[in-house]
Image (tube, coloured by chain):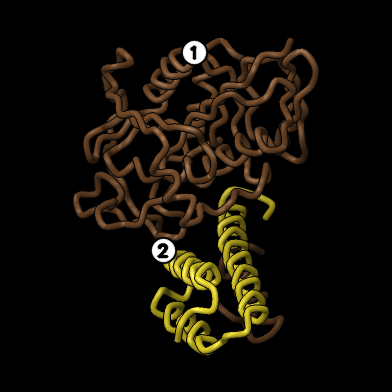
Chain colours: A yellow, B brown
Amino acid sequence: MPPSTPSLRHQVIALYKELLYLGREYPLGYDYFRPRLHKAFMSKAGETDEDKIRKGISQGEYVKKEIEMLYYLKRYRTLRKRYDADA
Amino acid sequence: MASKLRILVPVKRVIDYAVKPRVNKAMTAVETAGVKHSMNPFDELSVEESVRIREKKRFPGGVEDICAISAGPPKAADVLRTAMAMGADRAIHVELKDGEEMEPLTVAKMLKAAAEREKSNLVILGKQSIDDDAAQTGQMLAGLLGWPQATQASKVEFGENNSITVTKEVDGGVETVKAKLPMVVTTDLRLNEPRYASLPNIMKAKKKKLDKVGLGDFGLTNEPRLKVLKVTEPAPRQGGGKVEDVDGLVAKLKELGAL
């Protein structure tokens, strides 16, 4: 299948790589994260409607933010428990 | 005319906060080989704060330079890359041999020399590292430099004439102090929410400048004053017990001598 627009295709690949990179620290392990991420992308691999692809990308960006926030909160809470006497 | 900020951000590579440290067989130190390392979380806060001062244009004169510095083994370069990915402009790596440790006083002396060489007028560093938990470096550095210090900052604000107002976390509340540049600030957990060093930013950070120097370049040698005699794991927690009823509780308390 020829790519509809190269830039969208690149955006999707970049997003996938970034999510993979984020997944290395996933609390349930990379082995849990990677197949699920792959499945999520593969399920929409045949998508050709540009608007839908854009929507998918923004959904991916949202997931990225969520994971970053998850890491931040996990670390913040752990440190707070360790260093804050009242926590 | 307000001067421009030149911020020095010392960072340390430590065992990742999520890893449970193990004592080595010889009971002389914590096992570090093959253990995941990352940037000291308190140092992430200081990198983030420096970047935010620039991005939000909080300092009237603007931020001229954000320089990260770390002393450590060759792998400490990774945390400097992370600092640059988060937004530091450049980095200095003071290379030590693998397994070589520096005491807070030596670190403070090194940072003093670095701050003078880089003409820094603000040093933002973590209040402590999560491996040694000494919480001494910032204070010693301020003492050596003769600069005012604000420790455990939860808020940093800039005013007229190079003044800085810092809200500090103290027991049971906060304390607000004000001083003029130059200054040393150490960060506490609630100062900000550090950003994640994303993959594209890590890649971009590889183009930023990373200088490698030795302790000798600062005219220092690493002479430990303390000797670690023994390192042991904390005693395992004693499990609790359940009592059936009030009589059981009273009996148990009497048995333990609490009644």
Q: Position of residue B171 (x, y in %)?
A: 71, 38
Q: Residue visible at 54% across and 23% down?
A: B139
Work out whether B237 lies above or below B82: below
Tell me the CA gap for discs 2 and 1: 41 Å
Q: Residue visible at 59% across and 58% down?
A: A72
Q: Which mark is residue B236?
A: 2
Q: Position of residue B109 (x, y in %)?
A: 41, 18
The N terminus of chain B: image quadrant = top right
Of labels 2 and 1, earlier in sequence is 1
Kindly tell me whether residue B238 is visible in this rendering.
Answer: no
Work out whether B159 lies above or below B39: above
The chain letter under disc 1 is B
User: What is the three-letter code of the residue carrying label 1?
Assistant: Leu
The C terminus of chain B: image quadrant = bottom right
User: What is the three-letter code of the residue carrying label 2?
Assistant: Pro
Q: Position of residue A56 (x, y in %)?
A: 62, 78
Work out whether B25 lies above or below B214: below
Left or right? Give the position of B220 relative to B240. Answer: left
Tell me the element at label 2: loop
Q: Which residue is mark 1?
A: B144
The chain letter under disc 2 is B
Left or right? Give the position of A85 relative to B14. Answer: right
Q: Residue visible at 51% across and 14% down?
A: B119
